[in-house]
Amino acid sequence: MRIKTGIIGFDTIIGGGYRPNTVNVVVGASGTGKTIFSLQFLLKGIELGEKGIYVSFDMDAKAIRILAESLGWYELVKAIENGELLVTRSHADSISYLNEGRYRLH
């Protein structure tokens, strides 16, 4: 059984969705769609009655709410407000190693 992402075409590429009980990290350069991708996944989970957590190095809960509203994702905003979706901003001294060649998927 796979966990559907809610992202059109992506589930097909990865064999039907994410495997249960796995950690999936979304990494990429600025502006490549990581936030939208992640929020779409969380929105799908909320639609299915799941709870979620979003950890960001640059956006706090207010910024995520504003983005979700601008996209018309009011269920996401509601989930943040009622505690079904926790949004937290984390600090990292350096995450540049994530973009180094040895960590890239080919």
Image (tube, rainbow, N blue to C red):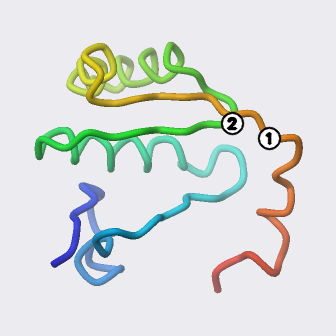
Q: Residue at x 23, y 77 (%)?
A: 16
Q: Residue at x 30, y 14 (%)?
A: 81
Front residue of this view, candidates 83 and 66 = 83
Q: Around disc 1, counting alpha carbons within 10 Å, would you say few (fewer than 14), some (14 to 19), or many (20 or more)?
A: few
Whichever of labels 1 and 2 marks the residue nearer the N terminus, that label is 2
Quadrant of residue 69 within the rendered picture: top left
User: CB atoms at circles 1 and 2 under 8 Å apart?
Assistant: yes
Up-down: is 33 above or below 8?
above
Up-down: is 49 above or below 95?
above
Q: Which residue is mark 2?
A: 57
Instruction: Find residue 34 and report its horizontal and vertical position in percent.
Output: 54, 49
Q: Around disc 2, counting alpha carbons within 10 Å, would you say few (fewer than 14), some (14 to 19), or many (20 or more)?
A: few
Total labels drawn:
2
Q: Which residue is mark 1?
A: 92
Instruction: Give the alpha-carbon distance from disc 1 to disc 2, as whole Å.
Output: 7 Å
> Would residue 47 be found to the left or right of residue 30 on screen?
left
Q: Amino acid at mark 1?
A: Ala
Up-down: is 30 above or below 99?
above
Instruction: Find residue 38 and report its horizontal and vertical position in percent.
Output: 43, 47
Q: Amino acid at mark 2?
A: Phe
Instruction: Find residue 8 and report its horizontal and vertical position in percent.
Output: 26, 61
Quadrant of residue 43 within the rendered picture: top left
- Residue furthest to the front in view is 21
